[in-house]
Image (cartoon, helix red, strand yellow):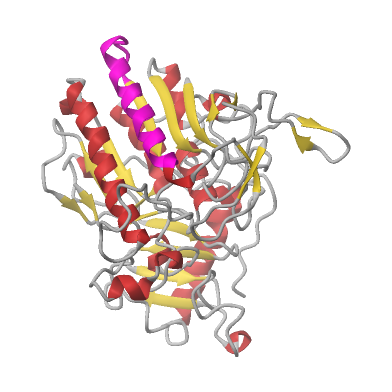
Amino acid sequence: MRLRDFHSNSSVCTPTRYGLLTGRYAWRTRLQKGVLDGGSEPLIARGRPTLASVLRDAGYRTALVGKWHLGLGWARDGAAGKADFARPFADGPLSCGFGSFLGVAASADMPPYVFLEGDRAVVAPTARFTSDFGPSREGPAAPGWTSEAIQDALIRRSIEELRKCSEDPRPLFLLVSLTSPHTPVAPSKDWQGRSGINRYADFVMQMDHDIGRVLTALRETGRAEDAFVVVTSDNGCSPEANFAQLAAHDHFPSAGFRGAKADLYEGGHRVPCLVRWPRRIARGSTSEALAGMTDWYATLAAVAGLGRPAAGGEDSVSLLPALTGKTDMPARDHFVMHSIDGSFALRVGNMKYLAARGSGGWSAPNGKTKGFGRLPAAQLYDLAEDPREEENLAAERPGVVASMRERLVAIVAAGRSTQGPASANDVPVRVGGE
């Protein structure tokens, strides 16, 4: 099934990953804008239920392969608090419900450049590294570290986790969190030049092939017919892909929508989402239901037969009825999106309200655009009539703007957007757009 109206809760990676694992909007935490880096403190609070911990407690084997990017409790030495990579870290994947972990601390363009396994670095990052591909940060690295080798190592480990199914009868929750096609744009040597377009296109081709490798390994376990598989993205495409080069070959990563990664416009957060569950989901089907990344918390609990978890998932709605064709009604009538600069957008039905003067991200108009301060403080678009968000209706529909802003403010203040125990944000949260 293709989910054609699926959204990341943020237009950048760390907050979306928080939403996936906790079923909660990340702006309810200290992270009000931007992303974490490889040396950041943990974002998921101790004791907070996660998708992994819920499934682990239900008897699942849980494994994470790939990018973490949610902060780690590094052991630190000295007055400067420098991370001691020789000692185990706390509050990482193992503390959040995963039984095993192999991956990297953050994005592949952020130090430390070293594989982590369990709760520690595989080897001491005694070298220094700066990627040759795309924007990167220089920092401590494992000797011989290369960006091109990351993808294959993650895929091989993912396949190993699937092969363990022959020895372990427990159901498996495997989160494969690839670092591709994020910067550094580093396809392996076997894939460089294969697209005939540019390195980004090569990298996407490699990623597609490697997802196929994982699905082949899944079929070999004999469990593929019962497996629930999701393929999606944590935000829209980065301009580092070189949109002009891609467009020259009739490829448009934002699929005609306005904006890209980091933005409040649809290109920043409306992302591809494919779901496969042969025994329950009709092959080749599509869904127009409004849905988002926070919804996997409630959805996968329902898939596992657990019902709604008793705790957590403050902003999560189960998509199971829509996925299995039990209802034509959308699982939710609204969704909140957030951009890299901390701006908010609210979707209700076909209407989208942006509490921002511009994109909220890297695309124009933004704070660097001449005359930005004179733009209207809010934006309103009818996505049914104007999916490219070209006509701002805020001035001619002030009542709609007022009601949507009031609802957004209420959602933010309530600490949750679903029914359940009273909750609260971790910090005061300002909506903006006034």
Q: Residue at x 35, y 30 (%)?
A: 156
Q: Is residue 157 magenta?
A: yes
Secondary structure predominantly adopted by residues drawn in magenta? helix
- Picture quadrant of residue 353: bottom left
Residue 285 is left or right of residue 315, and the answer is: left
Q: Residue at x 50, y 41 (%)?
A: 314
Q: Nearer the viewer, residue 36 or 193?
A: 193
Residue furthest right in the image: 79
Vertical side of 167 occupied by 216: above or below: below
| Quadrant position of the C terminus in the picture | bottom right
Q: Position of residue 337 (x, y in %)?
A: 47, 59
Q: Position of residue 247 (x, y in %)?
A: 29, 74
Q: Nearer the viewer, residue 355 or 102?
A: 102
Residue 425 is left or right of residue 242, and the answer is: right
Q: Position of residue 277 (x, y in %)?
A: 19, 34
Q: Which residues are magenta?
A: 149-171
Residue 98 visible in rendering:
no
- Picture quadrant of residue 210: top left
Vertical side of 226 occupied by 248: above or below: below
Q: Position of residue 176 (x, y in %)?
A: 38, 36
Vertical side of 185 occupied by 81: above or below: above
